[in-house]
Image (spheres, rainbow, N blue to C red):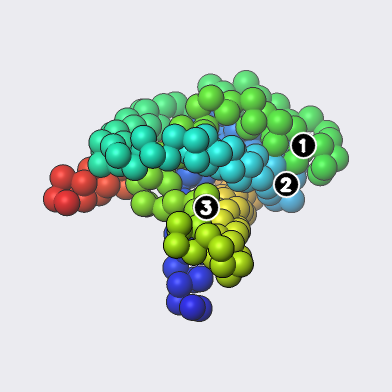
Amino acid sequence: MLIEIIKILFGGLCVGLASSVTVGPVAVLCIQRTLSRGHLAGFMSGMGIACADTLMAILAFSVYALLKSYIDEYSTIIQFCGGVFVVIVGIIIFFKNPVPQIRKNRAGKSALWQDFAYMFGFTLANFVVVIPYILAFFTMFNIDLAMEPDAEATAAASAHVGLWLNNVLVLGGFLLGATLWWFALTSVINFFRRGFRPRHMLTINRIAGVVISTLGIITLISVIID
């Protein structure tokens, strides 16, 4: 039982971590706040992003529940398309230059809760892009939220408890993975704060692009082999 719980939690953590390793507009703003106002401001901005991503993960799987029978029927094709999507995103991130955006953004003075709220709202505003991206990683790692108990166990209360526990662990792991990423990123940026230059973001972008594309390629290989 404990091993299964750790496995589910770790799976959600991997998705949360992988979904966060991007250097898009929200990450640039988070890094800018870290450089301008310190680690705590940057981390609170990152937590706003992590919580918004977790909420969108819930919304994404609400849609998934409505289309579950269709998705199950074409799971191999969908998983392959998810892998291709992730590879493309990785390539875009690799070649994207965030330097102009970093120089354009200037973080003013604001309270920590405002940093959180602003990044939370800003991330939600990009739901059209973020939700498919999150779903692609859930598909890639072959992680599913249980929407209803098995037909044979519908009458058993333990089945419903197990269902909710699975979902809580997956989403809890997702939030934990995203939180770890933003804490690590803002900590590193803050540590090298004085010597940090915008061009260093190019290196971060390329590393993130390689990691994400590699995950997508691994998924494509596993689908082809199966």
Q: Earlier in the sequence, mark 2 or mark 3?
A: 2
Q: Earlier in the sequence, mark 1 or mark 3?
A: 1
Q: CA distance from mark 2 to mark 3?
A: 35 Å
Q: Residue at x 69, y 35 (%)?
A: 119
Q: Is residue 21 above or below residue 131?
A: below
Q: Is residue 73 above or below residue 185?
A: above
Q: Which mark is residue 148?
A: 3
What x and y, as percent, mark residue 131?
51, 33
**Left or right of 197 on screen, residue 37:** right
Q: Earlier in the sequence, mark 2 or mark 1?
A: 2
**Left or right of 15 on screen, residue 220:** left
How many labels sit on residues?
Answer: 3
Q: Is residue 191 above or below residue 67?
A: below
Can the viewer see residue 160? yes
Mark 3: amino acid: Glu
Q: CA distance from mark 2 to mark 1?
A: 9 Å
Residue at the farthest bottom position: 2
Q: Residue at x 34, y 32 (%)?
A: 85
What x and y, as percent, mark residue 48?
69, 42
Q: Which of the two discs, 1 and 3, sits closer to the camera?
A: 3
Mark 2: amino acid: Met
Alpha-carbon neighbours of circle 1 within 10 Å: few (<14), some, or many (≥20)? some
Q: Which residue is mark 1?
A: 117
Q: Which mark is residue 44?
A: 2
